[in-house]
Image: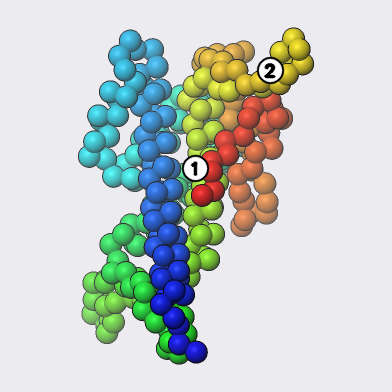
Amino acid sequence: MAINDEQYAAELNDAYRALGRFIVKFSQLISRMRWLASWRVALNSSENENYAELFFVEASAGNVSDAFFGLCRLIADYTPEEDEVAGKLQNDVMKVIKYRNRTAHGDWWVGYLSTKGDKIADPAFTVLKRLGKTDRHFAEDEPVPVKKLDERTDQLVELTALVSEFGFLALGLPLGVFETEEDGVLTVKYRPTGTQPSTRYRVSDVLTMTGPQHKRRVVRQGPKAGLLPAWKLQLA
């Protein structure tokens, strides 16, 4: 049965929703790294911390990532495990950036019907590439099912939460800490962590590595992870 107008509109809107959501969540990952780096640079200054973001005006997403993780390395003085956490997060960020660049510069095909005409075909994009001496094809097509794109965006949101918390820990920025009031109510208070070991949570206090060698991932299972509220960004 051929697709009707109502179904076509619903599937088309869902495809655009998924594409737009990925772009928005990607921008939040990059802006969070830029903001944290700028805040740390201006931390002991009387000037507005946002002024430091001017240095990133023409920075690409890759430049922002390099600056953020470079600053974290300089300030945090990693242990070997923290170095692995930082490397994994930076690797994952670069993979997302490369995918976003690939999709952003591709030719998108959205709203075309399937061969049977009963539904909309998966969104897809075409990327053109340089021809080598023996190449005969200069275009690569990649379908992007809406469900898969939503899953990729969910992973991006989780990565942004981990990178955000990593940044606060590595850069020694004020953290929200669980505290119990006199009446027994558990609240979150923001406390400056400083740069001294006695006043600072380390990356390894909260973030650790788990999994076999070929599937290592960053998890929030450090010895003090329960003392700090998790960074949970809205999966919308």
| Side of 67 where 153 appears, left or right | right
Closer to the camera in the image, 190 or 216 = 190
**Where does label 2 land, which residue?**
179
Q: Which mark is residue 111?
A: none
Q: Secondary structure at mark 2?
A: strand
Residue of label 1: 160
* Image coordinates for residue 217, horizontal then vertical, percent: 61, 48
Left or right: residue 79 versus residue 69 is right
Left or right, 100 with reference to 10: left
Residue neighbourhood size for the residue with mark 2, other residues' Cα within 10 Å, grouped as few (<14), some (14–19), many (≥20): some
Q: Which of the 4 image quadrants contains residue 22?
A: bottom left
* Residue 206 position in % (x across, y down): 64, 32
Disc with the residue nearer the chain's start (1 vs 2)? 1
Could you say which is closer to the camera, residue 220 or residue 137? 220
The answer to whether residue 209 is above or below residue 195 is below
Residue type, mark 1 in image: Thr
**CB atoms at circles 1 and 2 under 8 Å apart?**
no
Can residue 235 be seen here? The reply is yes
> Which residue appears farthest toward the right when viewing the image?
184
